[in-house]
């Protein structure tokens, strides 16, 4: 039987983000996405003008109907929340639908580039920390990881001196203590690992830190990487930074992780695959001069996700 994931996020008509990204990615991975909108927008909020319809009260009505259907979910994936009330409703959703055999993935949307988003209060941050503690896996960017750990998010804006030095694992080798570094570095990555392990105490079992930008000390190139931290392993995958951030890439990444979790994939393989797909999508967007607010051109790369297996096999077909 096809696995099901409840996806709680906003729906934006333009921007290739949120539910638009999640539905297409999760379905491509052979998993049924069951969307519960937190809001409906004409376009994501980076556009100069947009229509916004808050679904906070409607979330309860949708949940009530799903309860009547007696549905069960293999996974629950939570993204953008507009405020404290929505987080509390999300926590209430878990009381009904989260079971022993259900996984919960939380993408704790709160900030970027070293700062919390202005629309979110300190109370929101505390409630998001509460929600993240309930999760089995979280996918924060570096700023959001700092906010979850009550650390200075300013470190997320510091991309210097983070190159590969003395890790014994350059270009895909295995370092000490089960660490695998692929085209990656130390410095900011080590700091991110420590923060992730701090957040994991009494909280999620797995943390994937997305979009870590740093400058490689070996050649000065700016890089972009993703860090996967589990109880026993730390793995980091990085590629040359291609262009400025595009709308929806974090949603695409989290959606690949959610879909892979539902079908039993290896986390590290999905982290690598998500990074490769997004890199290709951004390359195309840069080539075609697509505005950042419109999102990366990922659609033609969805076939990469359509079956499980090693990343090498997928990318060679």
Image: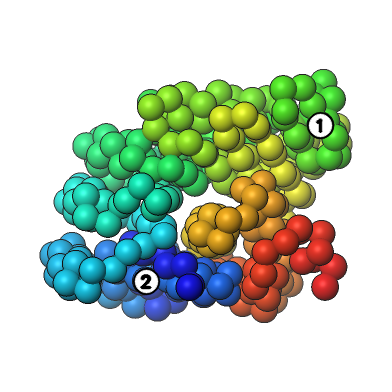
Res. 111 image quadrant: top left
**Mark 2 Cα shell of 10 Å, populated few (<14), some (14-19), many (≥20):** some
Q: Quarter-wise, where is residue 40 in the image?
A: bottom left
Residue 245 seen in the figure:
no
Q: Which residue is mark 1?
A: 174
Q: Nearer the viewer, residue 268 or 17?
A: 268
Residue 63: where, in percent of width, then height? 20, 66
Q: In the depicted view, which residue is nearer to us: 211 or 195? A: 195
Answer above or below: position of 209 versus 247: above
Which residue is at 32% across, 51% downward? 99
Query: How many callouts does the rendering have?
Result: 2
Q: Which circle's residue, 1 or 2, is located before the other in the chain?
A: 2
Q: Residues within 10 Å of mark 1 (few under 14, many from 20)?
A: some
Left or right of 245 in this view: 315 = right
Q: Position of residue 209 (x, y in %)?
A: 55, 41
How far, Cα to Cα, is label 1 from label 2?
39 Å
Q: Quadrant of residue 20?
A: bottom left
Residue shown at the point (41%, 58%) measured from the top left:
75
| Circle 2 SS class | strand
């Amino acid at each position: 039987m096809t696995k099901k994931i409840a996806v709680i996020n906003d729906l934006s008509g333009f921007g290739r983000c949120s539910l638009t990204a999640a539905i297409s990615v999760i379905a491509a991975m052979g998993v049924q996405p069951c969307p519960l909108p937190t809001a409906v927008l004409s376009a994501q909020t980076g556009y100069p003008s947009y229509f916004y319809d808050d679904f906070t009260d409607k979330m309860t009505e949708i949940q009530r109907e799903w309860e009547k259907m007696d549905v069960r979910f293999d996974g629950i994936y939570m993204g953008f929340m507009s405020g404290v009330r929505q987080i509390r409703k999300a926590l209430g959703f878990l009381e009904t639908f989260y079971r022993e055999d259900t996984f919960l993935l939380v993408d704790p949307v709160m900030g970027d580039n070293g700062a919390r988003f202005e629309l979110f209060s300190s109370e929101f941050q505390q409630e998001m920390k509460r929600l993240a503690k309930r999760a089995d896996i979280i996918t924060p960017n570096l700023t959001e990881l700092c906010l979850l750990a009550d650390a200075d998010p300013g470190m997320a804006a510091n991309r210097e001196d983070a190159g590969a030095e003395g890790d014994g694992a350059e270009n895909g080798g295995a370092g000490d203590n089960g660490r695998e570094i692929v085209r990656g570095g130390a410095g900011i990555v080590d700091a991110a690992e420590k923060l992730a392990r701090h957040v994991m105490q009494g909280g999620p079992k797995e943390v994937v830190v997305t979009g870590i930008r740093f400058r490689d000390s070996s050649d000065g190139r700016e890089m972009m990487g993703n860090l996967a931290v589990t109880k026993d392993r730390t793995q980091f995958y990085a590629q040359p930074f291609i262009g400025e951030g595009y709308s929806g890439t974090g949603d695409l990444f989290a959606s690949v992780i959610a879909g892979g979790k539902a079908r039993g994939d290896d986390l590290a393989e999905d982290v690598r695959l998500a990074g490769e797909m997004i890199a290709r999508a951004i390359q195309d967007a840069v080539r075609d001069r697509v505005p950042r607010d419109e999102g990366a051109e990922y659609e033609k790369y969805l076939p990469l996700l359509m079956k499980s297996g090693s990343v090498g096999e997928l990318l060679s077909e």
